Image: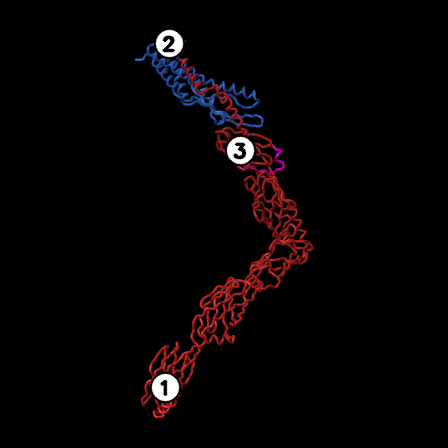
């Protein structure tokens, strides 16, 4: 009989999510720039062409994935030995994705104003937004589409298991 | 930091470093940085460039001017053909060889035996011809019936004696004359002999036999002839013969009756029907077969004949071509005012003569009067009225100012059309040969031009005024899509141009955008708006040409 079932499920699910090679979010800037990303891999397409820099970024992220697999595996091992474990990794990763659109907004707004580009772009967290951009002689009408993949929703759901996990371990800590 | 985290961090860093080293990231750093820039620069490809809009002129000023000028001109161009030898005379020398005219031979009549009723005669026919002994008569002798003897036949015949005593008395004295009546081929002869134990009758009879005779015929005509047939009363040609010019050939005749033939021939009364063929022309005529066998045959030869041509105008005109079925002008001539004699090449005098006689020979002339070439067809030996031009060919020089070959397929109007497709090389001149069916209709005529410029067919309707200016009001602009996204070009619009339809350019492809230009002189002063879509992005781009 396992003492802390939520913690166990949380830890094992976290490991599975980290191991799975799926993208979490897709950021599509009118088809001109498409970014598919997860904390462990990234693909950037510019005007339909895959950018080679994606490989280097992905390599760094894959290294991060390897590091996390080792750390979570160690935590699972210690947990099964009876040690109380509080692992916040997945929670931090999933929550951070809710923050990224804010960063994107800040970056885009900065770039546009510094290049004299006028746009009606207002903040977009998730979903679609029609953005009109005016630059010199060109008028662009872009559809910004930010949406998560199913794997992200699963990861987010799993990361919320941290709360019961935290509660059950805290209770017993007393 | 515990030990496991440290090891994990080291492994992760080692992985990343291994990747950087294996793929040689520092060496490729420029690629990573420049790739987005290169892609961004490719956007220039999809902006249409090289809008070269040109126009070219076809100057039809001459056409309308000439149409008006020629109304004043009048004259009749006439062509007269002199008489020429359409027949040639010559002769066939027919050398009739010596053939037996008469046949001579003997009839041996020997007394075989005598009795009181009659005499038995042994008769031998020495002739190589059958004979009929119609009668043998003496003072007391009567032949009861005709006797037929084949050549070399010997047999007994019996002759009745009317008075044996009288007969024997004469016979004994050697005074019994007998007359032998012979019929050869229906001709009767008679000869007499004194009947004795051995007597013969010498006869010379006409040769009524027939047979083949080889005859040499010499042809003195200047061309080869074929004698199909020569038929007379007593002879005919067994098979046709071909005799070259001034050559002799052997003809085989069948003579049905040598004597009859000779009698007529010697009196120059043998009329033969002769069929001769010269160059496919068959002539059949009756001629007297004599020692001089003269005949006139059609002149199927060709030759040069000088023909009189009258230029009615007071200026020189060009006669480029003049030809009919059997004659043609040797080369182009400049006809001075008045009469000129021009050498025409006749291919067959006889057929030309026949055509003229039947009024079937037409002459077609191509006359050049300044810039107008006129083709007319009219009967030979008559004149043609050039008073007023209804139609003619006009050559117009057209310059091509474009950097591409200009192909003019057709120019059509109610009263004119282009004679042949004309290609004009870039930056050069070409000549349009336009046929005008009615000069008076030319001014203000509506014409249609079909041409090809930049590989694109254009069709324009225009009005012939003093100068015909044709502009290419459609340009094809190549647009390349360098991206991996489909580009849709919805519209290119300006005040003086527009895109004919929506173009979808798949990734990596190039398409020609067909742009119509409304006013080519103004089009360079305006801004055009391009509406396109790349991926899901709509782009509206304003640019000056």
Q: Position of residue A130 (x, y in %)?
A: 51, 26
The colour assigned to chain A within the rendered structure: blue
Provide residue B303's location: percent of width, then percent of height.
58, 59
Q: From the viewer's perspective, is B349 left or right of A164?
A: right
Frontmost residue, B467 versus A4: B467
Q: Residue B298, image x and y in percent?
A: 54, 65
User: Is residue B525 highlighted in magenta?
Assistant: yes
| Residue at the limit of the structure toward the left, as seen here | A1
Badges 1 and 2: C-beta atoms under 8 Å apart? no
Write down the region rendered in magenta: B512-526
The hue used for chain B is red
Badge 1 element: loop
Disc 2 target residue: A170
Q: Is residue B375 visible?
A: no
C-alpha distance separating marks 3 and 1: 136 Å
Q: Secondary structure at mark 3?
A: strand
Rendered-image quadrant of the N terminus of chain B: top left
Q: Classify mark 2: residues with Cα within 10 Å, few (<14), some (14-19) or many (20+).
A: few
The residue to which callout 1 is attached is B196
| CB atoms of marks 3 and 1 within 8 Å | no
Q: Residue at x 68, y 51 (%)?
A: B69
**Quadrant location of the C terminus of chain B in the rendered image:** top right
Residues flagged by tags 1 and 2 on a common chain: no
- Residue found at the very far top of the displayed protein: A174
Pointer 2 chain: A
Categorize mark 3 by other alpha carbons within 10 Å: few (<14), some (14-19), many (20+): some
Residue A10 belongs to magenta span: no
Nearer the observer: mark 1 or 2; the answer is 1
Q: Give B103 or B500, whichever is nearer the viewer.
A: B103
Q: Name which residue lies at 54% across and 40% down.
A: B455
Identify the residue position indicated by label 3 in the image: B479
């Amino acid at each position: 009989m396992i003492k802390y079932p939520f913690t166990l499920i949380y830890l094992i699910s976290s490991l599975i999510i980290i191991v799975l090679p799926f993208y979490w979010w897709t950021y599509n800037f009118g088809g001109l720039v498409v970014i598919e990303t997860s904390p462990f891999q990234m693909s950037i397409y510019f005007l339909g062409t895959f950018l080679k820099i994606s490989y280097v970024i992905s390599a760094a992220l894959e290294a991060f994935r390897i590091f996390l697999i080792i750390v979570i595996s160690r935590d699972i091992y210690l947990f099964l030995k009876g040690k109380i474990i509080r692992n916040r990794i997945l929670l931090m990763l999933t929550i951070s994705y809710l923050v990224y659109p804010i960063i994107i907004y800040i970056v885009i707004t900065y770039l546009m104003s510094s290049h004299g580009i006028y746009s009606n772009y207002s903040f977009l967290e998730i979903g679609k937004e029609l953005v009109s951009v005016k630059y010199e002689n060109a008028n662009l009408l872009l559809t910004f589409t930010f949406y998560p993949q199913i794997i992200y929703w699963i990861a987010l759901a799993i990361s919320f298991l941290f709360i019961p996990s935290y509660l059950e371990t805290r209770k017993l800590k007393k | 930091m515990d030990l496991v985290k440290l090891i994990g961090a080291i492994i992760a860093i080692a992985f990343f470093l291994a990747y950087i080293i294996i793929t040689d990231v520092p060496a490729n750093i420029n690629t990573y940085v420049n790739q987005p820039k290169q892609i961004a620069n490719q956007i220039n490809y999809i902006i249409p460039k090289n809008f070269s809009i040109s126009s070219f002129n076809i100057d039809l000023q001459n056409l309308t001017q000439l149409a008006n000028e020629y109304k004043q001109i009048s004259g009749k161009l006439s062509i007269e053909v002199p008489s020429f030898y359409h027949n040639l005379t010559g002769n066939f020398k027919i050398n009739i060889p010596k053939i037996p005219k008469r046949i001579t031979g003997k009839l041996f009549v020997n007394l075989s035996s005598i009795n009181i009723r009659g005499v038995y005669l042994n008769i031998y026919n020495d002739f190589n011809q059958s004979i009929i002994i119609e009668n043998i008569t003496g003072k007391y002798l009567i032949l009861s019936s005709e006797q037929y003897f084949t050549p070399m036949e010997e047999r007994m015949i019996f002759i009745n004696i009317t008075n044996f005593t009288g007969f024997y008395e004469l016979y004994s004295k050697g005074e019994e004359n007998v007359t032998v009546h012979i019929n050869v081929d229906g001709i009767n002869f008679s000869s007499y002999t004194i009947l004795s134990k051995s007597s013969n009758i010498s006869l010379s009879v006409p040769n009524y036999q027939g047979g083949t005779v080889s005859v040499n015929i010499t042809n003195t005509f200047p061309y080869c002839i074929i004698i199909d047939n020569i038929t007379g009363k007593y002879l005919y040609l067994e098979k046709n013969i071909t005799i070259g010019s001034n050559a002799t050939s052997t003809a085989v005749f069948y003579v049905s009756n040598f004597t009859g033939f000779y009698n007529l021939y010697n009196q120059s009364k043998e009329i033969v029907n002769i069929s001769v063929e010269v160059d496919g022309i068959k002539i059949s005529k009756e001629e007297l077969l004599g020692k001089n066998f003269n005949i006139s045959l059609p002149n199927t030869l060709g030759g040069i004949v000088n023909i009189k041509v009258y230029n009615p105008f007071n200026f020189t005109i060009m006669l480029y071509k003049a030809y009919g079925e059997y004659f043609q002008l040797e080369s182009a001539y400049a006809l001075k005012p008045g009469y000129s004699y021009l050498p025409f090449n006749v291919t067959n005098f006889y057929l030309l003569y026949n055509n003229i006689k039947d009024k079937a020979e037409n002459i077609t002339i191509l006359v050049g009067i300044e810039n107008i070439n006129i083709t007319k067809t009219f009967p030979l030996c008559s004149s043609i009225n050039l008073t007023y031009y209804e139609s003619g060919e006009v050559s117009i020089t057209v310059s091509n100012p474009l950097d591409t070959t200009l192909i003019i397929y057709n120019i059509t109007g109610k009263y004119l059309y282009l004679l042949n497709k004309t290609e004009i090389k870039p930056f050069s001149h070409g000549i349009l040969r336009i046929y005008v069916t009615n000069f008076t209709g030319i001014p203000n005529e509506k014409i249609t031009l079909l041409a090809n410029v930049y590989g694109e067919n254009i069709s324009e309707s225009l009005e012939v005024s003093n100068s015909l200016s044709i502009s290419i009001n459609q340009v094809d602009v190549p647009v390349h899509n360098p991206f991996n996204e489909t580009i849709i070009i919805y519209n290119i619009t300006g005040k003086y141009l527009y895109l004919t339809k929506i173009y979808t350019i798949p990734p990596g492809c190039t398409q020609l955008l067909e742009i119509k230009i409304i006013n080519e002189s103004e089009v360079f002063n305006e801004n055009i708006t391009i509406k396109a879509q790349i991926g899901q992005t709509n782009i509206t781009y304003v640019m000056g040409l």
